[in-house]
Image: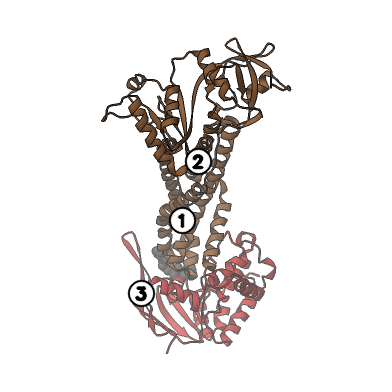
Chain colours: A red, B brown
């Protein structure tokens, strides 16, 4: 049985009288343990798709089954529990609490899991060490660089050891060395059997994933091994071929 | 439990982040609580003080008088009261002779605002001169600091002797022994035979120590015989207090020829009846205080409502993040409700502190007796947390209902 099963999922935003169709009939199956890259132009619906898969947003029509359960039947609180226990989310814009320290931010999902203060602290510290931020734990987000904030966001997604990790541009702000560390981390998680979905603009990263899908205008237009989809994406969007700044 | 602690520390964190804004918001609650605490401190102080003063009357004593005593509430027909016949020394004797439940009775009469002097010193014209029969030392719970009290023979013969209150003694004989010395009241000489123990002031106003006691007959010859006396009656014991009152009432009605259906043309006041009028007064004050208090708590509550709505709007993104990471609705609701309650409890605590401060200030500057009752503190805390809960629940419910994705987009 597939872990993620989308059938003709649409998501339509109502903006005034106009309706924006961010997803138009997406069908996607992801098995447990897969590592999938999602590529596509800006505005193609990648983040919207991640939100639906991450149980943050609900489809306007179609069906989404997570682990065999149709999530449209679940209450808000049940969805909150699923997000807390099963899903780690690295948001495109980090979404850290500005008033809290890096450590407190990473602790947050554990707070809602009902863990005691000491265990929370230990696990959050370990997660920050994994992303090489052991020396910045007491800093607030505005005292951190963009890349450091991104790593805090990653640590927060990893701290619950989720079975499904959703990452929206997790290496977008990182230099290639740090980015590489993070990718290694993902590879390790993949080896350990976690399921990973990873939105990226970087063809090099997509190429390393066993599987990739490409979104265009709210539809999946290609689905295959990462290398192939990445190449195809490169051909269609020459801007992405520009050498990466170092 | 962990969740509660987490919410609590979040709430204090918010307070620390905006202390000034929070304090301004709390003004209504602070004022409301401070009013309650201060007024309750005054009333309680009054009550404690009056009870203590009344107990100085002597054990199991009640007072028979022409005039109503204590604080009067409601209308009385003062003209009718002034036409009442005077109480006399013969009435006192009759009570002692004919009321078996009364052990003893004393008569007293007083003149305010008298000047007392010696050849070398004089007092302000504010001394309270009291004429008493010898039994007064028992019925009024008098204790003597030095010398002795007035005796039976001195009263009968209207001898020129006096017992001084400590303030008068200090004023006229500073640093000297007043016993055996001479004082002049209305230009007549009196020999000092005793000095009273210090008793303090009633309600912080009437000075019990600024007085001179004379034998009743001396007093009457000094100030005129046509006046009503007050009679203090002491019952055998606490159980026969009511019986003694009934005996005295019947005797007095007979002696004063009050027709059967008429009401008494005299007053019988016990500690209880005076306490009762005081309690009635304090109830009126309490009701007025609560009016003020409820109004300011309402203002305070609207302040809480406002600041919590602002907080929810400002922190929409934070709420979105919390929900995205797995906070259930109730958890968000609890977080913001706790914040509102903590906020208003801080206001309540400040108000209590302010109330204590005002009560102390009243004591130092005005000499009022004040005591903050524990229940007023408990009530204030309960009221302020109630206000926080009542007015915090709506903003918190709004926070709990937010959609995580939309909330995270907010800026
Ligand atoms: N809350 C919203 N209200 C209205 N329109 C929205 C909303 N969210 C997204 N959209 C629209 O849906 C479309 C898909 O948006 P989405 O954020 O999924 O794109 P994306 O692929 O993640 O782009 P990017 O790579 O720039 O992050 C866009 O056209 C966007 O304008
Ligand atoms: Mg996006």
Crowding near pointer 3: few (<14 within 10 Å), some, many (20+)? Answer: many
- Residue A232, position as x, y percentages in the image: 49, 81
Q: CA distance from mark 1 to mark 3?
A: 31 Å
Q: Quadrant of the N terminus of chain A?
A: bottom left
SS for dot 2: helix
Left or right: B147, with B329 as reference point: right
Report the residue marked by disc 3.
A10
Same chain for the residues under marks 1 and 2 in the image: yes
Question: Is the residue A210 above or below the residue B131 in the image?
Answer: below
State the residue at coordinates (43%, 71%). A56
Same chain for the residues under marks 1 and 3 in the image: no
Say which of marks 1 and 2 sits in front: 2
Question: Is the residue B401 above or below the residue B180 in the image?
Answer: below
What is the count of numbered marks? 3
State which chain disc 1 sits on: B
Contact, CB < 8 Å: mark 1 with mark 2?
no
Crowding near pointer 2: few (<14 within 10 Å), some, many (20+)? Answer: some
Report the residue marked by disc 1.
B312
Q: CA distance from mark 3 to mark 2?
A: 71 Å
- Residue A105, position as x, y percentages in the image: 58, 66
Q: Which dot marks residue B44?
A: 2
Outermost residue to the top: B187
SS for dot 3: strand
Of B272 and B384, nearer the camera is B272
Contact, CB < 8 Å: mark 1 with mark 3?
no
SS for dot 1: helix
- Residue B194, position as x, y percentages in the image: 64, 25
- Which quarter of the picture shows residue A184? bottom right
Say which of marks 1 and 3 sits in front: 1
Q: Quadrant of the C terminus of chain A?
A: bottom right
């Amino acid at each position: 049985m597939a872990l993620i099963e989308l059938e003709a999922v649409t998501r339509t935003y109502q903006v005034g009288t106009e309706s924006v169709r961010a997803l138009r009939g997406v069908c996607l199956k992801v098995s447990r343990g897969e590592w999938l890259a999602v590529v596509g132009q800006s505005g193609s619906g990648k983040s919207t798709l991640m939100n639906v898969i991450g149980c943050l947003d609900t489809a306007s029509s179609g069906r989404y089954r997570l682990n065999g359960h149709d999530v449209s039947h679940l209450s808000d609180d049940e969805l909150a529990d699923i997000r807390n226990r099963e899903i780690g989310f690295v948001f495109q814009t980090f979404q850290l609490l500005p008033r809290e320290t890096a450590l407190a931010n990473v602790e947050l999902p554990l707070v809602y899991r009902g863990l005691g203060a000491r265990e929370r602290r230990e696990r959050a510290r370990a997660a920050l060490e994994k992303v090489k931020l052991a020396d910045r734990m007491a800093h607030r987000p505005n005292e951190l660089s963009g890349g450091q904030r991104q790593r805090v966001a990653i640590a927060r997604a990893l701290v619950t050891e989720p079975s499904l990790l959703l990452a929206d541009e997790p290496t977008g702000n990182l230099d290639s060395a740090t980015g590489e560390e993070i990718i290694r981390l993902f590879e390790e998680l993949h080896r350990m059997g976690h399921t990973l979905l990873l939105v990226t603009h970087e063809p090099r990263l997509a190429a390393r994933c066993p599987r990739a899908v490409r979104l265009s205008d709210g539809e999946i237009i290609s689905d295959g091994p990462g290398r192939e989809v990445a190449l195809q994406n490169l051909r269609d969007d020459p801007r992405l071929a520009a050498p990466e700044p170092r | 439990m962990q969740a509660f602690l987490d919410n609590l520390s979040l709430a204090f964190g918010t307070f620390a982040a905006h202390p000034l804004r929070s304090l301004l918001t709390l003004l209504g609650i602070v004022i409301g609580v401070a009013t309650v605490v201060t007024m309750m401190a005054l009333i309680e102080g009054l009550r404690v003080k009056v009870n203590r003063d009344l107990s100085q009357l002597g054990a199991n004593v009640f007072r028979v008088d022409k005039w109503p005593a204590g604080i009067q509430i409601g209308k009385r027909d003062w003209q009718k009261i002034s036409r009442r016949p005077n109480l006399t020394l013969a009435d006192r004797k009759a009570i002692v002779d004919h009321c078996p439940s009364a052990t003893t009775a004393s008569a007293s009469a007083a003149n305010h605002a008298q000047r007392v002097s010696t050849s070398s010193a004089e007092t302000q014209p504010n001394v309270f001169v009291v004429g008493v029969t010898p039994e007064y030392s028992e019925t009024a719970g008098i204790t003597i600091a030095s010398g002795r009290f007035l005796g039976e023979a001195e009263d009968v013969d209207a001898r020129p002797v006096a017992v001084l209150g400590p303030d008068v003694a200090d004023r006229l004989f500073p640093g000297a022994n007043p016993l055996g010395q001479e004082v002049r009241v209305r230009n007549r000489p009196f020999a000092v035979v005793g000095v009273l123990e210090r008793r303090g002031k009633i309600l912080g106003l009437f000075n019990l120590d600024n007085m001179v006691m004379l034998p009743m007959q001396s007093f009457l010859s000094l100030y005129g015989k046509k006046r009503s006396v007050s009679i203090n009656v002491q019952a055998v014991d606490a159980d026969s207090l009511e019986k003694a009152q009934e005996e005295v009432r019947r005797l007095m009605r007979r002696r004063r020829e009050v027709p059967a259906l008429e009401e008494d043309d005299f007053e019988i006041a016990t500690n209880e009846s005076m306490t009762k009028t005081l309690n009635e007064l304090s109830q009126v004050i309490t009701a007025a205080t609560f009016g003020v208090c409820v109004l300011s708590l309402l203002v305070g509550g609207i302040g809480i409502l406002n600041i919590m709505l602002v907080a929810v709007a400002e922190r929409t993104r934070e709420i979105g993040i919390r929900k995205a990471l797995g906070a259930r609705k109730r958890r968000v609701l609890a977080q913001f409700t706790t914040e509102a309650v903590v906020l208003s409890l801080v206001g309540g605590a400040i108000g209590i502190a302010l109330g204590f401060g005002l009560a102390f200030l009243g004591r130092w500057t005005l000499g009022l007796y004040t005591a903050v009752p524990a229940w007023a503190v408990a009530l204030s805390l309960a009221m302020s947390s109630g206000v926080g809960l009542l007015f915090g629940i709506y903003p918190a419910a709004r926070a709990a209902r937010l959609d995580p994705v939309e909330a995270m987009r907010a800026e």
